[in-house]
Amino acid sequence: MPRTDSLEMGELTDTSYYILLSLLDAKHGYLVMKTIEQMTNNTFSIGPASLYTTIKKLVKAKLIEELEQPDIQNKKTYVTTKNGIQLLKKEVQRRREMVRHAEEIFKAKGEI
């Protein structure tokens, strides 16, 4: 049975989430990887193959777009679209709810 793509369900994988978040300011791929590592204190990293595969999916879904002019080093530069920002905000709220559910259960079990 084929796996349903999370983007089709309106949800983001951790990789997509961090790429969208890092592309609120336009960047090329290598800088996206470095920004994510810095933002997460090196607790989350994305390799080049995963990065570019996910970028292709996000472009296809119109959640990010390639800028017309490459950056100074002639690298493709991407930025999050308005649709991407909307989905990112929705995802932040969804994840908050997930944490809230877990905290309620832990509290009920005396684990917090």
Image: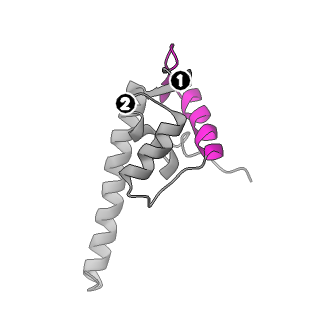
Toward the viewer: 37 or 67? 37
1 vs 2, front mark = 1
Which residue appears at 30% of the width and 78% of the height? 106
Which residue appears at 59% of the width and 28% of the height? 60
First in sequence, mark 1 or 2: give its number.
2
Residue 96 at x, y percent in the picture? 30, 56
Circle 2 is placed at which residue position? 25
Where is the N terminus found, in terms of image quarters? bottom right
Q: Residues within 10 Å of mark 1 (few under 14, many from 20)?
A: few
Quarter-of-image position of residue 103: bottom left
Answer left or right for 64 relative to 88. right
| Amino acid marked by disc 1 | Gln
Answer left or right for 108 relative to 56. left
Circle 1 is placed at which residue position? 73
Q: Residues within 10 Å of mark 2 (few under 14, many from 20)?
A: few
Toward the viewer: 89 or 24? 24
- As for residue 57 lying within the magenta part, the answer is yes
Q: Secondary structure at mark 2?
A: loop
Query: In the figure, 40 relative to 108: above or below?
Result: above
In the image, which residues are magenta?
Answer: 48-70
Residue 89 at x, y percent in the picture? 33, 40
Query: In the figure, 68 relative to 30: above or below?
Result: above
Which residue appears at 49% of the width and 21% of the height? 71
Q: Residue furthest front?
A: 73
Q: Residue furthest top?
A: 68
Toward the viewer: 28 or 18? 28
Whether residue 14 can be seen here: yes
| Amino acid marked by disc 2 | Asp
